[in-house]
Each structure stands twice: as structure tokens, then as C-alpha cells.
Image (cartoon, rainbow, N blue to C red):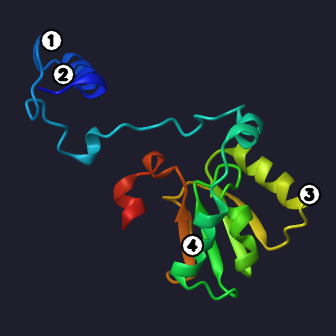
Amino acid sequence: MTCGFAASLELFLRTKSGLESPGPVSAGEWERPSSVADEVRFAADLYRGAAAAYDRYRLPYPAAMTADLVRRAGVSGRGRLLDLACGTGQLAFPLRRCFAEVWAVDQEPDMVRVVRAKAAAEQARNLQPVLSSAETLGAPPDYFELAVIGNAFHRLNRDLAAS
């Protein structure tokens, strides 16, 4: 028997999908959608009007984590960083000193405006804010030394982003 939140979620999903009337849910009884077409899609402008609050209240990534990422990736200090779905730059800004050039890419104009303002305030001349979805960004293969996606992979087209 599934318990707690998982049982509630399964019951909700079964009811909404019309699989059957609500009843006890046992483990493995409900099957998840089998195709990516069934995955949840987020509005492209989900955070419209909230970029300043997002920047102020979004917790930063731990410095130890970004340092470990740089070490494990073998960053040269001369390459390019691609930060996809960057929000207001929670990865782009702490990592920018390890790269000659940083592209901070987001599909929401408000987020890109905040990145642009922060880059100007910090005189981060190597940081380039880019308004684009991750899926439509034009960049040559092997152009970037490292690509990162913070807590945003769920907002991307997973098939395209993972390929």
C-alpha cells in the first residue's frame, strides 16, 4: 500500500486521468504516462513580473557545490560557459570567474533584464545575457567548455535538452 503524499498524488492523478473511480491505491497499480508527450509543460512566461522577487528570494547554490563542479569538469579558465534556463544567474555569476565568456540564457525577458542589470552593476564584462529558449539557441557544436542547467531541467523539452 502506498502511503502519505505518494498515495494522494497517485489518487489525484488517477481521478484526473479518468482511469477509474477513487479507491485504495497499491504500489504499481497506477502507471505513469509512457511518452514524453504526456509530460507537464510549463508556460514560457511562468515567472513574468516576478524576476526581482525570484532573484531576491531564490537560495543561491552552495559555493562548495560550484567549486566541486569546476574541479570535476576540469575547467580551463579560458573556455565558455553556457547557463541554460539561467533565471537571474544563480549559476552564471558565481561561475563567471572561471570562464573567459559566459552565456546566460533564459526565455523570459524579465529574467534576462535582471541578469543584464546585475552584470552591469558587477562589471561582469564576460557575461552575455541571451534571450532565447534552450531548445532554439543557435550555437556551434563544441562552442562551450561546460553547459549547466540549474534547477530548471523540468522546464525544458527534455528530449531536445538531453540530446
- The residue labelled by disc 4 is 68
Mark 3: which secondary structure?
helix
Residue occupying the point 60% across, 77% down: 70
Residue 133: x and y in percent read 56, 54
Q: Is residue 48 left or right of residue 116?
A: left
Q: Are marks 3 and 1 in contact (CB under 8 Å)?
A: no
- The residue labelled by disc 3 is 121
Residue 24: x and y in percent read 11, 16
Question: In this rendering, is residue 4 above or below 92?
Answer: above
Label located before the other in sequence (2 or 1): 2
Mark 1: which secondary structure?
loop
Mark 4: which secondary structure?
helix
Question: In this rendering, is residue 65 above or below 24?
Answer: below
Label located before the other in sequence (2 or 3): 2
**Disc 1/disc 4 C-alpha distance (Å):** 47 Å
**Disc 4/disc 3 C-alpha distance (Å):** 27 Å
Amino acid residing under circle 4: Asp
In which quadrant is the N terminus drawn? Answer: top left
Label located before the other in sequence (1 or 4): 1
Question: In this rendering, is residue 9 above or below 107?
Answer: above
Q: Are marks 2 and 1 in contact (CB under 8 Å)?
A: yes
Query: Front-most of 73 and 64?
Result: 64
Residue occupying the point 56% across, 76% down: 146
On the question of residue 55 being in view, the answer is yes
- The residue labelled by disc 2 is 14
Residue occupying the point 86% across, 52% down: 117
- The residue labelled by disc 1 is 22
Residue 154: x and y in percent read 43, 47
Amino acid residing under circle 3: Ala
**Disc 2/disc 1 C-alpha distance (Å):** 7 Å
Label located before the other in sequence (3 or 1): 1
